[in-house]
Image (cartoon, rainbow, N blue to C red):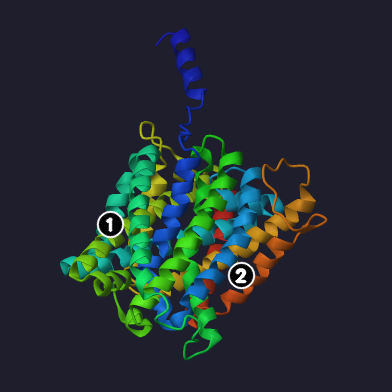
Amino acid sequence: MTAPNLTKKLKLELIPKKKHKLKRELGLLECTFYGIGVILGAGIYALIGKAAGIGGPMVWVSFALAAIIAAFTGLSYAELSSMFPKDASEYAYAENAFNKRLAFIVGWLLIIAGVVSSAAVALGFAGYFSALFHTPQIPAAITLIFVLSLLSYWGIKESAWFNIVFTLIEAGGLLIIIAMGMKYIGTIDYFELPPTGFVGVLGATSLIFFAFIGFEDIVKLAEETKKPREILPKALIISIIVSTIIYILVAISAVSIMNWQALAASPAPLADVAKIAMGSQGFLMLSAIALFSTTNTVLIILIATSRIIYGMADMKALPEKLALVHKTRRTPHLAVALMFILTSLFILIDDITLIASMTDFAIFVTFILVNASLIALRYKKPKVKRAFKVPLNIGSFSVIAFLGIILNIYFIFHLEFTAIIAGSILLLAGLGLYEAYNFYKNKK
């Protein structure tokens, strides 16, 4: 090889390879449908029966309380997303407000929440699928995760349109339940406390909060959204409002049509509600719609959590290979593959209530830190541009964010003791992972 050719080769090898980036293809419509789609399917089809068993006829109040908790934190997300439009959203908030260690814990908890919540909703899908086709639940749930992981890998635009279609179907199913319940309205006392009293209503609220998880997933699409500072806050607020109205009306209709004790015992609660109101055809129709709904929710959670993994890896908080983007599909393929493996493992737990409660623990802790980040950043970085600002402030102090912290702390202690212990172990595991990974990096 001649000297000039050798020099040319060495220069080429020294030039860093071009890093493929995610494509900005999402607008307000797609982001809002992402939010509504993941919220509506996250729990109403899978958990309304369990929640009714705890909250009784007042389960609709539990939905309203859960919505208030979600709204307080949702507003904090809206402001923070307008400041730091990043895929590793919560990680970026905590890092700017506090430090890398706390930021890693937030990111770790979100990854765990994404993994266990996608597993929980996949089991919800499997419950309806088994009711229709009499198949084992765990294989059905894992197959769903595999197929949706392929779609997540294939492309964000394709996933977005899939989500819009499925969101319209799942919302249609809930509107059918509301319509069917109209003639049953007034047949029960909607303020009758469950046997455990108002404590039961609060306990149901803690479980139901799982049904609102998902609004925060919108901010994880920041690097694939066209104007994230403007679009993400709007999509967050619209998603929570629309979903809350639908949830409360569905809860009222469900307990009006079907005795709450029977609702609690049903593996496919809304399908059984439809069966009472419309016969076997109603059962088949709602079971099919529930399949669409839970499928859609799992897809969105898989996408959002893989973006958290990608974003943290891109910020060097996780192995950098997880930040690789496929050169043709323009998706974080290794992060998607990791999500498939982890979610499949959690499905093997096969206890939807425990899995949902573990998710709630991780999310409650994360929301506490997100609200705390907003308060800290009001003082630490007051001049950073904010396209949206949370209302109700005393000077720079956010009253809404403070209430969000108090409420999330309160509801942690209304979770099952087993879920609190399991969640605490996962939190400590995240801290251990952070220290181990940093020791490994420093050693290198």
Specify the label residue 144 is tagged with. 1
Identify the residue shown where x is 36% and y is 80%: 264
Residue nearest the observer in this picture, 244 or 336: 244
Cα–Cα span, label 1 and label 2: 32 Å
Identify the residue shown where x is 28% and y is 59%: 289
Residue 214 is at least partly visible in this image: no
Specify the label residue 202 is tagged with. none
- The quadrant of the image that shows the N terminus is top left
Residue 1 is at least partly visible in this image: yes
Q: Amino acid under label 2?
A: Asn
Residue 193 picture location, percent across and down: 50, 87
Is residue 368 rendered to the left or right of residue 194? right
Residue 383 picture location, percent across and down: 78, 42
Residue 93 picture location, percent across and down: 64, 51
Residues at discs 1 and 2 in contact (Cβ within 8 Å) = no
Which of the two discs, 1 and 2, sits closer to the camera? Answer: 2
Q: Amino acid under label 1?
A: Leu
Residue nearest the observer in this picture, 188 or 233: 188
The answer to whether 381 is drawn above or below residue 418 in the figure is above
Residue with the mark numbered 2: 408
Identify the residue shown where x is 50% and y is 90%: 196
Q: Describe the element under mark 2 as helix, strand or loop.
A: helix
Count of residue discs: 2
Q: Residues within 10 Å of mark 1 (few under 14, many from 20)?
A: many
